[in-house]
Amino acid sequence: MLSQVLVPRPHLDTRAAERLRPPDAESAVKENLYAGTSAGLATAGYRCAKYTPQEWFANNYATLKQAATEGSNAQRIQHESKRLSTETGSAALRTQAEATTHLGERLQDIYFWKAELGRHIERLLAETELLLAQKRRLEKALDATEIPFAIATDNLTCRERRFGPDLVQDQVEEELLKEVELIRSIQALLKKTLDQAVNQIRLNREAKQTLELDWSDKHQAYNLDDQCGRYSNRSRDTQHYPSSAKVHDQCVPLHAWLGFTHTNLGLAEREQAASSALRQLCERVLLETAEDLRAQCASVEQAFSLRCQELTQAKSQLELQLTQVLEQIGAQERNISSLQQAVYDKEAPLRVAQSRLHYRAQRPNMELCRDQPQISLLGEVDEISRSVQELQVQLAQAWDSLAQLEQSRLLLEKDISCKTHSLLIDRQKCMKHRTRYPTMLTLSGY
């Protein structure tokens, strides 16, 4: 038994050796690959652990070749790495500069549209304030119409208290009725215009709120983009956000962003134009209604003046006629007194004549003759009787005339009282009440 420990020989990759050895050494290696081996050990099924010199040279050559190859490969990788590092660094700086430039341009766009939104917000705010002032004027003008309406209705009510022939539907009443209808129509127009103003103010505020929300979003976006634009490679507050590189589902395209802002600005411009047109309409309505009311007020006052002149003139004529009637009544009363005196004065001559005839009728016998005194006395009695009868007829006519004059006096006094009452109503109550009629400025809502 051998005292020497035998170990298996390491397997030699002949293919690797063939790739690493030079071409001229290939035949020598083939020939001497197994040269110098121990025959005794080979017969025993074992080979020695020692390499042959050729194997040593081949292994050394392969190791050197592999090291040289790996070194070349390492140098190539180093150069490629330097080149790639330089290129990627330049590309990163270039893309970062481009992104910063794009952020700056985006900031300019956001600032421009934010400024446009702010300008339209200020214009809408100013327009709304002007429309609110018109709304307050409409409310004041509507409240101011209550006074003319109360005056006109009070005038009509007061004139209903006229009596007699003065209770007539004259020009004053027609103008007052026109004034009442005009005030009602003006109140309806002012209420309608006021409703339009309230609705337009609501639309203005809604448009302003839309612009303010858009402005707020752009302000926040501007601050975020400004913060992003200030980031640099030396910033210490940057972090890794791996999930931030994916496209969000709620992202909108740029044309939709521009369209949204254009739509909001267009809505604001339309509401501003509508508000401006409504303000002009309110101004025209206030001016025209105030002018119409003042013109109708002037017409009513002119009708009152003419009516008062007519009443005054009629009253003066009635008073003059009453004076004449009173004078005629006095003259007639004196005439009646004189007629009564005349009748009374005829009684004595009639008694004398009748007494003479009575006593002469007592003459005796032939003395009772129809002599000239008898004829004269008879003629005297007949004449006095006819005179008294005529005086009685004239006296009756005088009494009738006096009664007619008294009736005329009563009618004249009643008519004068009626005219005085009408003048009191028209001049002292109605026209004095109309001095409280609102001025042009008050009716215009100031």
Image: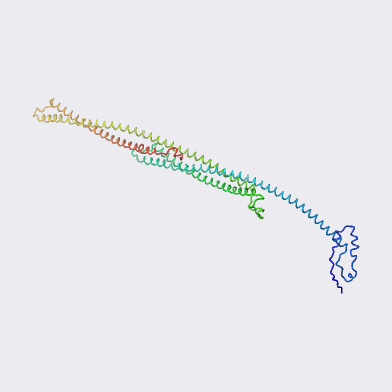
Pick the front one: 38 or 366: 38
Q: Is residue 353 above or below residue 70?
A: above
Q: Is residue 186 left or right of residue 21?
A: left
Report the label total.
Answer: 0
Hey, which residue is sitting farthest bottom in the picture?
1
Percent position of residue 139, x then y: 46, 43
Q: Is residue 276 left or right of residue 26?
A: left
Percent position of residue 216, x then y: 58, 48
Percent position of residue 95, x then y: 69, 48
Q: Indicate the quadrant where residue 367 lies.
A: top left
Hey, which residue is sitting farthest left in the picture?
364
Pick the front one: 147 or 301: 147
**Residue 165 visible at all:** no
Q: How is the image coloured?
A: rainbow
**Residue 154 visible at all:** yes
Pick the front one: 5 or 421: 5
Percent position of residue 320, x then y: 30, 31
Pick the front one: 367 or 395: 395
Hey, which residue is sitting farthest front in the picture?
3
Quarter of the image with the N terminus is bottom right
